[in-house]
Image (cartoon, rainbow, N blue to C red):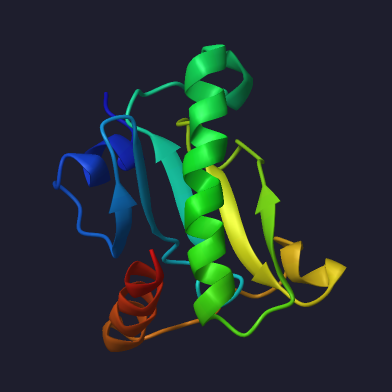
Amino acid sequence: MASIFTRIILGEIPCYKIAESEEYFAFLDINPLARGHTLVIPRQETDYYFDLEDELLAGMQVFSKKIARAIDQVMDCKRVGLVVLGLEVPHAHIHLIPINSLHDTEFSRPKLTLSPEEFEEIASKIRSAL
């Protein structure tokens, strides 16, 4: 059975897409820790991040760097944090989170509730910086 992320890539589940390539896909997290919290995934459905082939994993980092630079330009943050947890969805993914302190990457914190309009505005800002 396809993961929820594969279903997002296939367009079966809507998302706030940031960017895509032949190998990777980036979209806003719908349960964000911060405005601009973005997920980067490989199109190839692989459960564990460290099971990705070296070339795919390295390319995912480079793709993520482009997205992080765009987030950094348009969101109010000191940096963009990169977190790999791999427990929430059985599909390798990277969290890119705009941060101002170490505590901003604590997943036990309450998530933001944003309207569809707010998500689209954020996605549009990030896309425009790419």
Q: Please indicate whether residue 48 sits to the left or right of residue 26 in the image.
A: right
Q: Give the percent coordinates (x, y) of residue 72.
A: 59, 71
Q: Please indicate whether residue 101 sits to the left or right of residue 128 in the image.
A: right
Numbered disc total: 0
Q: Which of 14 and 52 is in front in this view?
A: 52
Q: Can residue 128 be seen in this view?
A: yes
Q: Nearer the viewer, residue 117 or 109?
A: 117
Q: Please indicate whether residue 7 sits to the left or right of residue 106 in the image.
A: left
Please identify the residue farthest to the right as the structure is shown: 102
Q: Quadrant of the N terminus?
A: top left
Q: In this view, does 62 lie above or below 34?
A: above
Q: Give the percent coordinates (x, y) of residue 29.
A: 45, 62
Q: Quadrant of the C terminus?
A: bottom left
Q: Is residue 37 visible?
A: no
**Image point (41%, 66%), residue name:** 30
Q: In this view, does 99 lie above or below 96?
A: below
**Image point (24%, 42%), residue name:** 9
**Image point (14%, 47%), residue name:** 11
**Image point (37%, 79%), residue name:** 125
Q: Give the percent coordinates (x, y) of residue 4.
A: 32, 41
